[in-house]
Amino acid sequence: MNETGITQDNTLDRTKPPKAKPPKDVHFPDYYDTTLANGINLLVIENYKIPSVSIRFVFKDAGSYYDNGKYGVSSVTADLLTKGTRNRTATQIAEETDFYGASLSAGDDWDGSYVSLTVLKKFLDKVTDVLADVVLNPVFAEEEINRLKEQRISSIIQGKDEPSVLSDKMFNKVVFEGSPYAFPPEGTEESIRSMTRDDIAGFYDEHYRPDKLILAFVGAISKEEAIKIVNEKFSVWEKKDVEPVNTEMRQSDQPPTFSTDRVYIVDKPSSVQSNLRIGHTGIARNNPDFIAVTVMNTILGGYFGSRINYDLREKHGFTYGARSSFSTRILPGDFSVDADVRNEVTDSSVERIIENLQSMTSEEVTDEELQTVKNYLTGLFPLQLETANAVATRVINLKLYGLPKNYYSTYISQINGLTKKDILDAAQKYIHPDKLFIVISGNANVIRDKMARFGKVEVYDADGKPEQK
Amino acid sequence: MTEISNNGKLKPAKIRFDEFELDNGLQIILSNDSYIPSVAINLCYHVGSKDEDENKRGFAHLFEHLMFEGSKNVPQGIYDKLLTFAGGDNNAYTTEDKTNYYVLLPSNQLELGLWLESDRMLQFAITQDSLETQKEVVMEEKRQNIDNRPYGTVSVEFAPKLFKTSGYRWDPIGDMKDIKNATLSDVKNFFERFYIPNNAVLSITGDINKDETLAMIRKYFGGIKRGKDINRKNFNEPPLASETVSVIYDNIHFPGIFIGYRIPGEQTREQYAFDILSEILSSGESSRFYRELVYKKQLVSEIGCYADTKEYAGIFYIFAILMPGVKVDTVQSEIDNIVSEAISGNIKEEEIQKVKNRIEAKSIYRRQLILSKADMLAHFKTFYGDAELINTNLENYLKVTKEDIISSSQKYINPNNRVVLHYLPVQDKK
């Protein structure tokens, strides 16, 4: 359709940004939430935007934190769920779900283990049976275990090619020394090699149980339909009395207790960039200061216009991008600043990062910085509620981390209520520029001398072994 | 949003939209979706790396960076500030064929987004300082995503081996020598040639009122002058005459195999057939590659394939990373056998139905986000003049038959029409 007679608007003043119309309210969707006799916490997040349904199992107290020295067992157990049951082989499971265009996956993180199925509504009744089967009846056949172990070891070795993987491992090792968080959730070559079927079946028996289960039905499905499926497939599943235990040291919610005067370099001689991870322990997900910390971190390094990205990328051209983040879990995860910078500016970049952390903890942010980030986070909030699964993820987080039920309905007002003093308090409480761990994977020969001004330099190889002197 | 069809099964609602064209040639597509109070503004410029002069490789992508560096009424650094202050987000990407910009905003801030986008189209206002900084940033982007990444050079290696005469013979990241040498007048010329309303499609989705939005678009974009018609280079790539096999040493532990066949471009009959073939070979754990090579024989840790189709040509890619101790030749011949078996016609109807079910599901999931709808509408309009493909394209896949797969493959899936890259650990170099 071609337009005719357009009038040239000569009065248009382009020099000033146009004014916004009044904002619209954002509502967090309602959902159904109940606990069944065997302890299952059933959630139904009903939404007919597209004719699709997801069924998501979240087992609490079932993540890598509970590996108990068998590093990787939580993750291996999850991977094996879809690799054979009392009724189906791995191949049959794949064929059955693939045929109906369903995606069935299982996995874990530090806090839980997960199984989820997404399928078009018209095929839902074809695949609920296989879903129930993988959750309730996995057999952990030796042949499948051996195959998975070989693949896992190959993937761990392959990870040594990736600069960010090398930095991650070293960073977690030094920051979380003495905690399960110090070890890779996917396991080590040694822990995977020595893992037995008993380790895996034992992990399953202890952690996959209805009284630890959040079960969410998401999308084009009613409460009644969801309850019918649960009654048919999961009502005879019995709860357990014994709580899962972690035999290793628990971590406290305290700031790091010792300052470091060391720089850890993981040597990757071929590197043309240094991958930086600078930080220390952070906060737990249910920390009451979480929202203040989120706003503070966003100003510091949490979005494109943040101080750290602006300084390292836009002002100095040292990097394609730099960011800071708090990884929040049931217990405090890490706070870290990450960037890939070219070899020659490695020390300048570290210096810029430390200066940004120092100014964040010594002076209030500006009114403009605070208002920008408040608007940014609240403006993007509706986009985080755009799909039924995105809403479900947030509802699941409320349950998994024990957050107040009105957390998301008050999220915007909580952000808007923060003051510059709140931000400075959060920075001073949770960022410690004098207690930083500086970890770099990169070309040790090129960068080691320049890094000496930040502390005693220790060089390790890709396997984490200290350099031979 | 969902309607119940006659057979009682749920099917997705058609995406409705309206199209307009301004006198200056700007194409406009508006589609309302008030599920959340947000809007997506997508501006697709029909210029990518293949349109670059051969001694200015990487300009389309460098220019993408520069578009954030200020415009006539928006000083350097202010574009991002204003958008984030309004609660918005934005980004852009560059391919061989297009440079695509998007903005997400609360719907009450739509006008701000239009003002910012129109100001960037209005007039070139980049400074020398911005240019120098963004050259550094682009070079870091290449180091991070290509040079310092295992197997990261695959696309850079493939391009000149698969294409000989067209602008597809270099990767969008370009040549760092050309980036270093870029002058302000070079980039200004590039802007004036390609960043014109008659080379752009503006699509807006989300919580919008059609008439109000159109009036705002006229206000901000209506006064921008039409640019000179673009004289596009002819695409005339002779077929590959023989197989190319190259060994590349990289900082990796395990060898990788990367195979690329030259195939026809997007929205051709062959594209649909090759998309179906790639799903049969590699989608899901019931796929042929996974079942044989990952599961049964345990020769590879990862394997996949996909049809990467561009405006004028495409590449049918296959890639695999080997398990420890496995030989490249072993896996290469296993892959070739599996492909030969499939394209000889040994495909069950059930397998084709499975793949069609998977493609249907994916096509429905993509319709959930206002941003992905805006992107698809602009893409289909830019390259095929037909935004309605957002609703009808699935049919093109559902029509594919076994015979289509066989006939397309016989013509294009043969060794003389391919490039094979064997990535080997640098420590194996003799």
Image (cartoon, helix red, strand yellow):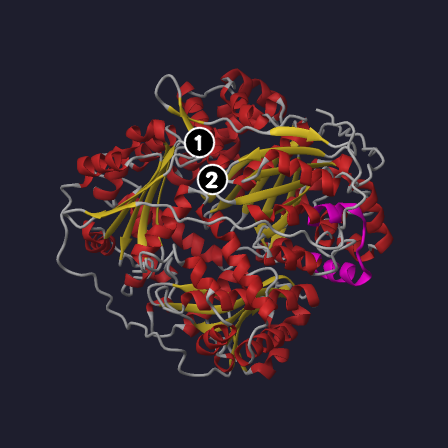
Measuring from the top left, give residue B2's x and y in whole percent: 42, 29
The answer to the question of whether label 2 and label 1 lie on touching residues, with beta carbons closer than 8 A, is yes
Numbered circle sitting on residue B1:
1
Q: Residues within 10 Å of mark 1 (few under 14, many from 20)?
A: some
Looking at the picture, which amino acid does disc 1 mark?
Met
Q: Nearer the viewer, residue B359 or B157?
A: B359
Residue type at numbered disc 2: Tyr
| Residue B229 image position (x, y, % from top left) | 83, 33
Instruction: Name the secondary structure under disc 2.
Output: loop
> Which residue is more in the foreground, A71 or B86?
B86
Picture quarter with the C terminus of chain B: bottom right
Locate residue B70 relative to residue B209 in the image: left or right: right
Q: Main secondary structure of the magenta part?
A: helix
Residue that badge 2 annotates: B35
- A204 relative to A274 in the view: left or right: left
The correct choice, above or below, for A361 with respect to A400 in the image is below
Residue at the image point whose x is 53% and y is 16% from the top: B403
Q: Residue at x 67, y 51 (%)?
A: A18
Few, some or many residues within 10 Å of mark 2 (<14, 14–19, 20+): some
Residue B320's place in the image compared with A457, above or below, is above
Q: Which residues are magenta?
A: B116-138
